Image (cartoon, grey):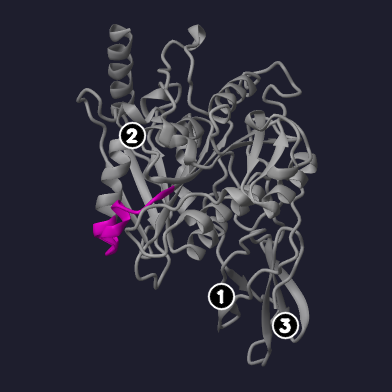
Amino acid sequence: MRILALFLLALAGSASAQKAPYDVFPEAAPPYYRVRYEASDKPGELVYPVNYTVWVPPGVKALRGVIVHQHGCGEGSCKSGLTGAFDLHWQALAKKHDCALLAPSYEQPDKAECQMWCDPRNGSSAAFQKGLVDLGAQSGHPELSKVPWALWGHSGGGHWAGGMVLMHPERVAAAWLRSGVPLLEANPSRSTIKTHTVPEAALSVPIMCNLGTKEGVTVKEGRFAGAWASNEAFFNAVRSRGGLIGVSVDPFTAHECGNQRYLAMPWLDACLTARLPKTSGEPLKAMPAENAWLAPLLGTEAAPVAKFSEDKTKAVWLPNEAIAKAWTQYVKDSAVTDTTPPPAPTKVKIKGNEITWEAGADLESGIASFTIERDGVAIGSVPEKSANPYGRPIFQGLQYSDTPVQPLVKMVFTDTKAEAGGKYTYRVIAVNTVGLKSK
């Protein structure tokens, strides 16, 4: 095993040296900050280069936490992490709770060993925490290195986020694991993956295991068919000991993220509302037990704990009634409803025939597009056609690992039919992903 590990280390280092850095970024000017670390050849340290980009809500006095959006394995997914901190929808969640939004991008060469970063014991936990220190100094928020973490991870990123829960349960406010969980029992076919144990403290951390039905639930064959067995084993190990863990199965997808963010956002919102201390630096609060709802594993209906008649140690845990209702919608058709319109755009400016503006996303449903009106008549939409091959059409588009596409879509519209010297009144209206319009 040691020979194998050393071989993987040498292979990873060699491959990394032959690859150019991921040097195509969205610009990281304040309120964005970035640090990058080179690969290490020291035992136990990270064998791949990595960069961390963080967004800090403008005007925040003291951060209360950091939300981490962790990509999955493979070169394509790693590069998709470059835009994670620029996601307007995730920023809306972070802003509500005075949290920073951080996205790593591990420079894993194609076909290299993912475990060398997605197992946090292989140096990525230490690199992440070093990044928080350096980004805190760079942004003027040194508390960034000490505040709690809310973790979201896809595939290998789910493995990483779950591993961080098991290693640092006192730091994690909540964790959403999409299509990836830590391995708790040895699997002979995956001998390079080290197993974890579940400490008692991790049972108090809210966790949601989220995957597509085509990952072994209803479709039993294919590349990702083994995901359900791993998720089920992890769920049973944690829930049988009273852990605050749930399962949500997307009824349409395989390994792609689909519409999971429309359940992940309110779920994380509920957990952060309950657990984050009001004052930065204080310890996390416990989840209130009296609000919880339960549901049968792979079921579609939930009930308050007091009215749930089946075995509670085998039931999906949900933090409150609102999340239970959203979960019920999600597992049936992924169409989580929303009745709240998005916030109105601000700072609309006109220069020549070019109109620019700023806007925050709707926490529940994000932004699908912006409608541009001239003298009360719609004359265009930005983008002209919203796109997302994995779920609801969305303004920034989505890559496989749930991050915006590059280049980032800009909030700008050119009125090509405006007459020189003409006087016009323009309005910009935000439209969320369920079709609701802002003022």
Look at mark 3 in the image and give the residue it sits on.
374
Q: How many residues crowd around disc 2 within 10 Å: few (fewer than 14), some, or many (20 or more)?
A: many
Q: How many residues crowd around disc 3 within 10 Å: few (fewer than 14), some, or many (20 or more)?
A: some
Quick one: label 2 or label 3, which is nearer the N terminus? 2
Quick one: label 3 or label 1, which is nearer the N terminus? 1
Look at mark 1 in the image and give the residue it sits on.
356
Quick one: label 1 or label 2, which is nearer the N terminus? 2
Residue at 64% x, 47% y is 292
Position of residue 261 in the picture relative to residue 171 (left or right): right
Residue at 28% x, 17% y is 10
Is residue 140 shown in magenta? Answer: yes
The magenta stretch is 136-149
Between residues 281 and 44, which one lies in front from this camera angle? 281
Position of residue 342 in the picture relative to residue 276 (left or right): right
User: What percent of the width, then of the height, locates residue 61?
Assistant: 35, 71
The correct choice, above or below, for 366 with respect to 309 in the image is below
Q: Secondary structure at mark 2?
A: helix
Position of residue 388 in the picture relative to residue 96 (left or right): right
**Residue 124: mark:** 2
Residue at 55% x, 25% y is 234
| Total numbered badges shown on the rendered structure | 3
Is residue 195 shown in magenta? Answer: no
Residue closest to the far front: 306
Q: Amino acid at mark 2?
A: Ser
Q: What is the C-alpha distance between the residues marked 3 and 1?
A: 14 Å
Q: Secondary structure at mark 3?
A: strand
User: What percent of the width, then of the height, locates residue 170?
Assistant: 37, 43
User: What percent of the width, then of the height, locates residue 34?
Assistant: 33, 53
